[in-house]
Image (cartoon, helix red, strand yellow):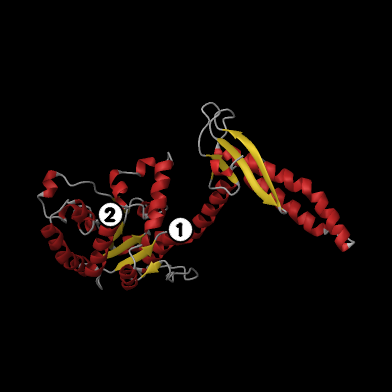
Amino acid sequence: MNLSDFEKTNYSGLYVSKVAHPTFGKKYIARFQHEKKRYVKVLGYTKKDELTKKMALNLMQKFKDSILISNEPKKIIKEKVENNSMSINNDEIIKLKEENKLMKEILGEDFSIHDPEVIKDGIQKLYEAEELKQYQIELIKLQNYLENENKRMIILFEGRDASGKGGAIRRITRYMNNKHYRVVALGKPTETQKNQWFLQRYIEHFPTGGEIVLFDRSWYNRAMVEPIFGFCTPEEHEIFMEDVVNFEQDLVRQGMILIKLYFSVSKEEQKRRFDRRINDPLRQWKFSEVDMQAQELWGEFSDKKYEMLRRTNSRSAPWHIVRSDDKHKARLEALKIILNSVDYDGRNYALDFQPNEKVNISVQKELMQMRKSQDY
């Protein structure tokens, strides 16, 4: 069996043939080393045995377990000879049995047949959801404050494709009172809107007293997307860049609470997320023609991003840069930024509202990083 005919899967020790047999399909093998011995076993074929990667992983695990169990008596005998004694700690055995029983109660008796990575990922998501929940409770308090004080809030979510904007919006709004918030994601402008003042179609969706409006992409399309894809002229782009700061200052001066979030994803992580969208049937609908060009046009987007952050960051309406390669940390920091923007009643000061400086990056630091490298 020539290992060069096989390629690694994303599971250690599990390999699949590069070329499929016309009748049997691709062949899975397990290959690992234990106590200086190498073990190889053919697990089966995709067509002949209807073998999936998940099934192959379980078969490999059973093969590994059989090797480990068969070697265990030899190991015990060796330890007895070397130590001339062997003590069994009953307390440790009882503890292990209790832990095993608890695991089975939580995961079910047949948890071992499931992909360990899926179980691990699911448990991690539960921990993350619990951590977010305390801050989501605070968001409800903030909503009540805005309603009682008749205040208005706009939150802009900007960033490259696959930077995590949509996921953050879903976590932020999950438990909020849906009578007092709206998510706005505008499509292409109509012919009528093209002949209007550019900002007019956004103003139509602005909040009333006691309401929050979350823009999934905003008027900053004109700063990045539109000039790159030729949806506006250079003159229209420049007019926007010159006028937007004054526009936002007027909004804030008139009592609008304006929060601008930029989700900053790395080029490598964006590619990983695109690949996942392409290969995952549940995510394929997210992948678009524009996404296909995002990596190719990375440099052009970087140039526009740099110009946008440099020219449109102001005291009254600053940008908050959220590094979003780690989705959970990005969502947590976005929640903190929103909560720290208002001195609402009943704040739970036991929570940590301090920014994580590795995730919540200042504009100056982001621009300095971009001058060194275009990875973000």
Percent across and percent down for residue 322 are 37, 64
> Taking the image as drawn, is residue 211 in sight?
no
Q: Residues within 10 Å of mark 1 (few under 14, many from 20)?
A: some
Task: Name which residue lies at 46% across and 68% down.
Answer: 348
SS for dot 2:
loop
- Assign the N terminus to one quadrant of the image: top right
Mark toward the viewer: 1 or 2? 2
- Circles 1, 2 touching at the beta carbon (< 8 Å): no
Task: Name which residue lies at 84% across and 58% down.
Answer: 79
Q: How many marks?
A: 2
Q: CA distance from mark 1 to mark 2?
A: 27 Å
Task: Name which residue lies at 42% across and 51% down.
Answer: 272
Which of the pair 154/88 is nearer the observer? 88
Which of the pair 44/306 is nearer the observer? 44
SS for dot 1:
helix
Report the disc number at residue 84.
none
Judging by the rendered image, the residue that carries numbered circle 1 is: 328
157 above or below 194? below
361 above or below 203? below
47 above or below 284? above
**Quarter of the view holding residue 327:** bottom left
Residue type at tag 1: His
Percent across and percent down for residue 87 are 86, 60
Report the disc number at residue 297.
2
